[in-house]
Amino acid sequence: MATHHDHSTAGSDDAVMTELLDLDAEVLHAYLSEVTAWVHRLAGDPAPSHLLDLGSGTGTGTFALLERFEKADVTALDMSAPYLHHLRNKADERGVAHRVRTVQADLDATWPDLDPVDLVWAASSLHHMADPVRTLTDVRTTLRPGGLLVAVELESFPHFLPDDLGIGRPGLEARCHAAMAEERNARLPHMGADWGPLLTRAGFTVETERVFTVDLTPPLPAATGRYAQLCLRRMRTGLEGRLSADDLAALDALLDEEGPDGLLRRGDLHVRTTRTAWAARRPDRR
Ligand SMILES: C[S@@+](CC[C@H](N)C(=O)[O-])C[C@H]1O[C@@H](n2cnc3c(N)ncnc32)[C@H](O)[C@@H]1O
């Protein structure tokens, strides 16, 4: 049977989200390499030494930045103790623990006491903040004058499915995304915002904006099936009552690990998503 309700408790939810964030890093590694190369070029010379990963999660950005900025250290900041614990374990395994510091803080409640940094990376985290302009204003005071902030945001989970699923219900995934967006708009009103004006309001000078397109075609590594499964399972939790019974049944067939149509068995997954990045500087004078 499909187990799409098996992450109803807080503990297992953390475990699922941890796996999902790590799969983001694994499946989207080529995009990460592209975006950090772009950040490296924008940051210029001398390369930044002290980096802050704001809302680091399990360290997708932290590790990509450590790889790109070979001499830098990264402060990974997040409100989630389990994510930071996992991130520290990964840093140990990868032999980079001496370059990573973790800080647990809920940025809606307080801005922690941080040393000045040369570069701030905030990926898929700003839309979670209750008052992003206030948080960005705090970020600006921690960034050294002239330092760079890179904010990366996403529209939604990636798309994985072909239109013809072989089980009927053409357009199922698009309907899932539309229904999910409806549910999410009230909960996360800043998701999909135009961050340029918000960065300006927080006192940054926006330098550039760039859309990164991910388009991974089959054959894809096995991790892709698991990634699709976790993303669609997570979407499924908010779709009850928002999709027709036939659509929900088709989604359950895809999520059924043992069934013939399960995502792990499909060879036709195709990962499509975009990430939009804004690069902004703290002006020298502020
Ligand atoms: C979608 S995850 C992105 C994680 C990571 N940046 C990545 O790219 O994989 C959003 C992260 O923001 C963190 N977060 C959300 N609200 C926060 C807050 N108020 N203070 C600190 N961190 C927060 C969450 O705990 C989560 O780790």
Image (tube, rainbow, N blue to C red):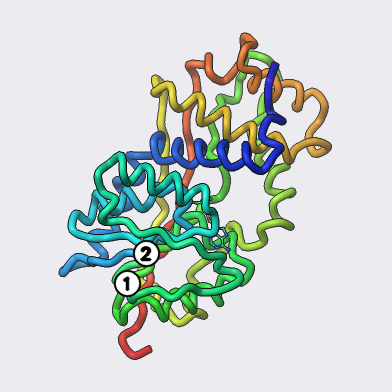
Q: Is residue 21 above or below residue 107?
A: above
Q: Are marks 1 and 2 in contact (CB under 8 Å)?
A: yes
The residue lying at 65 percent from left, 40 percent from top is 177
Can you see residue 69? yes
x%, y% of residue 165? Answer: 61, 19
Secondary structure under the numbered disc 2 in the rendered image:
strand
The residue that mark 2 highlights is 52
- Type of amino acid at the residue the image marks with label 1: Val
Q: Earlier in the sequence, mark 1 or mark 2?
A: 2
Mark 1, other Cα within 10 Å: few <14 / some 14–19 / many ≥20: many
The residue lying at 50 percent from left, 24 percent from top is 225
In the image, taking residue 161 as reference, residue 252 lies left or right, namely right
- Type of amino acid at the residue the image marks with label 2: Leu
In the image, taking residue 116 as reference, residue 126 lies left or right, namely right
Measure the C-alpha gap from mark 1 to mark 2: 7 Å
The residue that mark 1 highlights is 117
> The N terminus lies in which quarter of the figure?
top right
Residue at the extreme bottom of the image, as rendered: 285
Q: Is residue 188 above or below residue 27?
A: below
* 81, 109: nearer the viewer: 81
> The C terminus lies in which quarter of the figure?
bottom left
In the image, taking residue 143 as reference, residue 10 lies left or right, namely right
